Image (cartoon, rainbow, N blue to C red):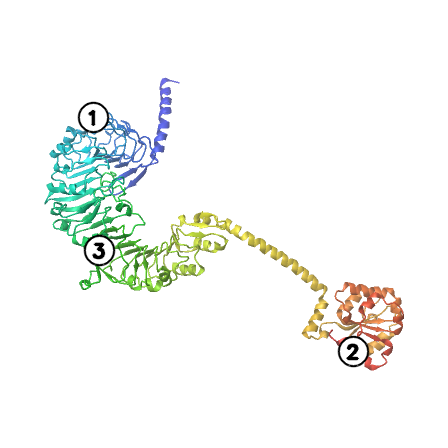
Amino acid sequence: MTTNELLTVVTLWLIVPRLHSQISDINRCVYEKNERDLVANCSNGNFTAVPQGFLKNVTVLDLSMNKITSIGNMSFPYRLKVHTLSMHGNLLTHLDEGSLKNLPELSKLDLGKNRINFTSLSLPTGLFRGLPLKRLLMSNMSGKLNQNWKYPEDTFLDLHQLQELAIDAPGNPTFGVGFLNMINLQTLTISFCEKETLNTSAFEIFKKLNLSAFQINACNKGQVDKNITDIFQDLNILDIRNTVDTNLSKRLMGLKNYENSSMQRVSFIANVDGDKDPTEHCSILTKNMTRYLVTMCVSEVYLIGNRIRIIERGTLIQPPFSQCLQVLDLSHNMILEEYGVLRKIFFYPNLVSFHFEQFLEDLKQAYHEVFYFYDTNSIFQDTNKMVWPQHNPETCLFSVDAEKRDNEVIPQSESRKTGIMPLLFPRNMTTLYFAPALKPFTNIEHDMYFFGTEKWSKALFSNCSVLAKNVHFFGLENLQSLVISGNGFMELPTIFMKSFPNIQNLSLNHITRGFKEISENIDSVLGHFQHLENLHLVGNGLCDLPRYVENLTNIKLIDVSYNSIKELSVATRTRLDTVAQKKNLSVNLRGNVLSCGCDSLEFILWSMDSKVSFVDSTHYTCRNDNGTIIRVKDIADSFMKMWRECIALFSLLFSICLVFLFLLGISVSLHIARNINVIKRWRIKWLGLDFQRHFQYDVFVYYSSKEDPQWVCNTLRQKLEDDRDLRLCIPERDFEPGVYTCEEVLGAINKSWKTIIYLTQTFLEDELCAFRLSSAIYVGENLTSDRFIILYSDAVFRHPLPSIINQLLDKDNRFPIECFRDSLLWDQLHSRILRKD
């Protein structure tokens, strides 16, 4: 092997595994294309280093929330067109000097929430050289910093195009020449999490810059000089929050320098520490405190968590302030007159958004919610909006949204201004969020009139424990969505629902009273809605769909999630199938513990085959006969197995029944076959039938084969056959010659209605004759004495009789032969033969 071949093998041995690792890493990133950018989303990918192999035309690179510790010179080995890079929430401790050189178009960089300690080692000189950076976020660092650390000024000298900077501040910050070179800086956000005071003098250097937005977050640790605003005379946004020992009064008085000026936002937010004295800084918002603020034309005002207890009458409603205000937030104070705050917003004719939220914890001053800066939470966040905490679902809430609509807005009638309960709102309002802690809403017993609500498209009223009579709401004719949750109705709300003729989405969730009446009268309550498409009936304890709800004109979705439905009844399923044949219909059963036992197989099979669409069906759960909770999706996959398990017991019982019936049938058939003559006689006896139609002979005459047959063949035959028209079976005449067996005797007995035994001395002497008779009677069941007539001679009783004869003898079935000279006896014999015993 030559030297070149050896080098080739070694090179491949080193490169191939690395290429495989790079391909594996980059596969964890997701590319997303929008109108302007190609975004590589590699967030939360558990990366420990910058993955390799990005497309060269990628413009936005999101590497946030990983475990990357550094950015080296080869982290970006080739040029990319990236203009936005987020390294937010990693473990970065340093960046190499040339680590960003292959990102020549980089204008937005987020290094926040890492472990960078702001030294020349972590941020070396020349790091940002040649980059057109306009937005740089480096706040909320978690690394250990020296107590008197200083900024690497030489590194910041290259940021002359920077427009926005978010950065942590030390205990005694010194902003030197590096910041002075940021000649285009407009927005400065300081995170000051030290237990010291941030003095006005620290910001002297920024007097030479034309800052328009200044924001400070003191992390509930540091103090900020009340005169901090003296440095900045031309601010458009002022946001100071989470400071220690600086009350609202001092902040508002600090606006003296902005008297008669115009600003976009004034924000004083204080997240109160629960360990403080609850009586400290409880304030009354007075006209004197706001005397400078009301002279200003401010678009947005946030006074959150400032322990405001009372707002003096006439405060904050003077022009030009009241005329310019578009956004107002008074949340998380200690205001007791909450409903009065809602009524006051009418004094702001251009108000677009009003936010008011208080919890009981606010009144106890133990609230710890975090309000992030609108522009430093993430580099991808819209810089024009605040970050709102998530809403507590159990809070009493009245909220409104105004959305863009296609249909024409119906103007309000001016003739309704004399209503009993008028509520006035600014006509430009698009967002209202009112969540009081003390639930000041009273039961609604009178018609209500809403003014300035023409643009409202959605209204929500939840969890206020309010009961409403069947009243009319005027002014909400344009609503398209209405949510009523956690409230109730004292009367059937037929008139109330007619207040909203254009509703498309209606939610009646967790209704506290009156829902049963509503569900039983869906036609009269909701039948007038011509545009209703989505109906939500969540958490109302339903066991089935309300009757006829599927017949609403344009209904598309029936949401009955989180009720008590185990299965839909057969009638409901039939109605749903009928509607689904004509239009698309969806049902949401999520949150109901359905039944998937053997009794519900029909429902499960229907849900699999029906044209009705089930929303969120992959999240449905059900309980089987063993009490086990399983997912409905698993039921569908193993339906046949479940069917076999359910049908097994039934099949076993059914098989046992079939076998029993089969054996019973055989037994009965055999019994009938053996007793066919008994059955025929029973039918003749109890149904009054003519026995001559069912038997071949009327009388079988049995006598000994050694007997002289003259009397039988002549006298007996003549008296019974010729004179009385009976059919006789005489062996001498009717049996085959030479055949006189037990079988022949039994056959003759069964074919005859009665049997005459000709008992003589010869009969007694003929043992074979008695044996034939006893054998035939033994084989033939139920041959009782009433079927036999014995003609005997007197001499037979002088000798012992065979046992079979003794069994057949009865007082009325024997006739002496010697007495047959009398014709009357022949008549008695004839009658005895014909009698149906």
Q: How many marks?
A: 3
Q: Which callout, 1 or 2, points at the residue further toward the start of the chain? A: 1
Q: Residue at x 16, y 50 (%)?
A: 312
Position in image of residue 219 (x %, y %): 24, 37
Q: Amino acid at mark 1?
A: Thr
Q: Quadrant of residue 728?
A: bottom right
Figure check: 601 above or below 10: below
342 or 361: nearer the eye?
Answer: 361
Question: Circles 2 and 3: CB distance less than 8 Å?
Answer: no
What is the crowding at mark 2: few (fewer than 14 residues within 10 Å), some, or many (at least 20)?
A: some
Which labelled disc corresponds to residue 455? 3
In the picture, measured across the screen, residue 654 lies left or right of residue 666, that is left
Residue type indicated by callout 3: Lys
Instruction: Confirm whether residue 834 shows in the render.
Output: yes
- 135 up-or-down from 758: above or below: above
The residue that disc 2 covers is 830
Taking 396 as reference, is 576 left or right?
right
Structural distance between the alpha carbons of marks 1 and 2: 144 Å
Q: Which mark is residue 125?
A: 1
Q: Quadrant of the C terminus?
A: bottom right
Q: Quadrant of residue 227?
A: top left
Reading the chain from its start, which is encountered first: label 2 or label 3?
A: 3
Drawn side of residue 542 relative to residue 276, left or right: right
Mark 2: which amino acid?
Answer: His
Q: Along the polypeptide, which appears first: circle 3 or circle 1?
A: 1
Residue 468 in the image: x percent, y percent? 30, 60
Question: How far apart in space, not on screen, are marks 3 and 1 (Cα)?
Answer: 55 Å
